[in-house]
Amino acid sequence: MSGVVVWLRAKLIPSDKFRDECGVVAIYSHPEAETLAYLGLHALQHRGQESAGIVTSDGLSLHIHKSMGLVADIFTEKKLSRLRGTLAIGHTRYSTTGDSALLNAQPIMVQSNKGMMALAHNGNLVNAQEIRGRMEAQGSIFQTSSDTEVIVHLIAQSREHTLPEAIADALRCVEGAFSLVMISPDRIFAARDPRGFRPLAMGRIPAQLDQLQDTIVFASETCAFDLVGANYEREVKPGELVIVGPEGTASLFYAPALAQSSCIFEHVYFSRPDSRVFGRPVQESREQLGRQLAIEAPADADLVVPVPDSGVTAAMGYAAESGIPLRFGLIRNHYVGRTFIEPQQSVRDFGVKLKLNPVRSLLEGRRVVLIDDSIVRGTTSRKIVRMVRGAGAKEVHMRISCPPTISPCFYGVDTPRKKELIAANNSVEEIRKYIGADSLSYLSLEGMKKACHDGEKTTYCTACYTGKYPTNLVDVEEILPATVEKP
Ligand code: SF4
């Protein structure tokens, strides 16, 4: 030993993407409901990696386990065996409101005058603070800082006598985005907000010989159905509350559906390409986004290179439409955790280099079209362009498979404030200069809507590209441009 102490610095790996919100799953009537919920959450892990939880029912009472971390780490065989039940709901979370602590992990389970129940929520309520303030003034005590708890209190305080009516009553009071699953000792409930912001699909596993009923499954994305062997049946409709119990499945429209505004970013980025979301295969939308991009923003180039993994499917579409060969010129390391130890002698762009590495033999001397799904702050894109050039590319043409993101989301997606969004405060030419590309083009709003079949079965929210929000309530401070000082 030389006696020299080497200080290693652990740092968070920077992320320059909109962050996924949450994933929910529910199982009605299966002898291994807890295992099916666990598998469903595993398939939905990309929607939230901060905490996860499962609540099960054995027919009489509810049992819960939730913890910080990834689904596979939280639920050991021993933990699952303690959750044995025939009904289950599950949640995987990346916090959008409330602190990122175990206290706010979901499902939230309560004992109320309507009996025992638990609830898991994907989305964000825009009037939660207002309702909470009112309830606290009247003496309600909240256990968490999460907006979801407001729904639980509203259900408990409802004057309706049955749980389904009390849930419907509560849902009529809240505004914003919610896809919910709930559990009582003998029922599963699933609901979507009247605008249908976030997805929620219903599937079915046909009854086995020893089962009296089919198993009904709800999940944020259909990739969860594939893992548990469920067949996709339909979407839970905007404004609908589905109740599954011993007497079968019932549907209650607790509020008239409003103009539909399903999140188009589910198709652009969040959902897995093997999922069907809002009734449409994500793979088709994403490939079509790439094709449309090639039509609107052609490039004179030798290779189409996706930024992995976000740009892969759109790059396939771009390559197919343009006839330019697709090559994986950037390789992603899939085994990077949330923190890393940085060497003392700082290495330029170290965080991005940990995740991505260029394939020099492919890129050297080539004119490259680099495809990604978004530029949020621009810092990561700048490093990637520099990396591709550093590997010998002659030209780098950046193409983005959606329009510039100019406004934050209030509907369950973690986005930076407007002043941090590069496209909110700079022209496309200014962004091109900043990221150091030879050319930069985004897909048009109309092109994106066309690729996702807007107006056919689904009408989409596009507020983060237009600044036009489908609800009245938004946080004004969050949407101030960079040039405006806070009062
Ligand atoms: S603002 Fe953007 S991310 Fe949020 S729901 Fe609308 S389209 Fe989705």
Image (cartoon, rainbow, N blue to C red):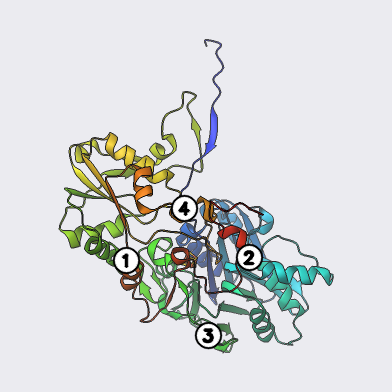
Residue 135 left/right relative to 214:
right
User: Mark 1 is on which residue type?
Assistant: Gln
Q: What residue type is labelled 3?
A: Ala
Q: Counting residues from the N terminus, which is met first, the one under dot 1 or under dot 4?
A: 1
Query: The residue under label 4 is which amino acid type?
Result: Asn
Q: Can residue 157 be seen from the camera position used here?
A: yes
Residue reaching furthest to the right: 139
Which residue is denoted by mark 2 in the rendering?
107
**Tag in front: 4 or 3:** 4
Q: How far apart are marks 1 and 4 (CA)?
A: 32 Å
Residue placed under numbered mark 1 in the picture:
283
Say whether mark 2 is within 8 Å of ligand 1.
no
Residue receiving disc 4: 425
Element assignment for label 4: helix
* Along the line of sight, the residue nearer the viewer: 384 or 419: 419
Tell me where residue 130 appears, x and y as whole percent. Answer: 71, 70
Q: Do the residues labelled 2 and 1 touch (CB within 8 Å)?
A: no
Q: Mark 3 points at which residue?
A: 257
